[in-house]
Image (cartoon, grey):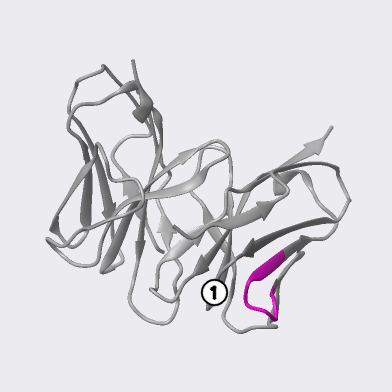
Amino acid sequence: GQQLNQSPQSMFIQEGEDVSMNCTSSSIFNTWLWYKQDPGEGPVLLIALYKAGELTSNGRLTAQFGITRKDSFLNISASIPSDVGIYFCAGRDSNYQLIWGAGTKLIIKP
Amino acid sequence: DVKVTQSSRYLVKRTGEKVFLECVQDMDHENMFWYRQDPGLGLRLIYFSYDVKMKEKGDIPEGYSVSREKKERFSLILESASTNQTSMYLCASRGTGSSYEQYFGPGTRLTVT
């Protein structure tokens, strides 16, 4: 089936640093979603993107729908301890199914 | 407030047992999903349902079945649990419309010994 490549797989960062992660696909997607999963909980939607080139912010988070429709980026500015967790991207394909990335695990160095 | 609940947070079962995982949503959503989550593999779709009594196989349906007798409830069944089914199981629901957001339950961590 279709696959999304999400990178990096994990990140160790200092509090206050900016974070970037991305997802790429060999197929075109019509929607990109970014989720965050806190430890022991289910994923929660952070940002939804519906148009190529769209740039959307949610507080310190900014996500972009790539112009080729085959990629998306999530940036977190000035990270804080509660940013730890797993971030997932998901793309909607032409069959209206969501394809999920493997996740980026964010760890903040003490 | 949107709510998806799962019957258990943690479950320990023996190999060969029949296991039921229950999911209930209170948003009157048509679509419901079961995923399993394993480290490094992300979320993999087991089954989904787009209406009562309707079900569709996802990417990894082998060893699982589902039941949707009522709109708000979607059950995942492991007919004969095996150790390779030890995992985190996540249920999600989604309404119809242009938003493709799925709402997730807290997950059930199943251990098969």
Q: x and y percent of residue B53 in the render?
A: 12, 60
Q: x and y percent of residue B44 in the render?
A: 43, 48
Q: x and y percent of residue A31 in the render?
A: 53, 75
**Is the residue B76 above or below the residue A34 in the image?**
above
- Could you tell whether B40 is left or right of A94 in the image? right
- Could you tell whether B49 is left or right of B107 in the image? left
- Could you tell whether B62 is left or right of B109 in the image? left
Q: x and y percent of residue B74 in the render?
A: 22, 52
The residue under label 1 is which amino acid type? Answer: Phe
Whether residue A70 is in magenta: the answer is yes
Quarter of image, res B26: bottom left
- Could you tell whether A6 is left or right of B29 in the image? right
| Residue at the image point whose x is 37% and y is 57% from the top | B3
| Residue at the image point whose x is 88% and y is 50% from the top | A16
Whether residue A110 is in magenta: the answer is no
**Is the residue A23 above or below the residue A30 in the image?**
above
Q: What stretch is highlighted in magenta?
A: A65-73
Q: Which of A8 and B104 is in front in this view?
A: A8
Residue tagged 1:
A29
| Residue at the image point whose x is 46% and y is 68% from the top | B101
Name the secondary structure under disc 1: loop
Where, quadrant-wise, is the N terminus of chain A in this rendering?
bottom left
**Is the residue A17 above or below the residue B12 in the image?**
below
Where, quadrant-wise, is the C terminus of chain A in this rendering?
top right
**Is the residue B2 above or below the residue B109 in the image?**
below
Please give the chain letter of the residue carrying mark 1: A
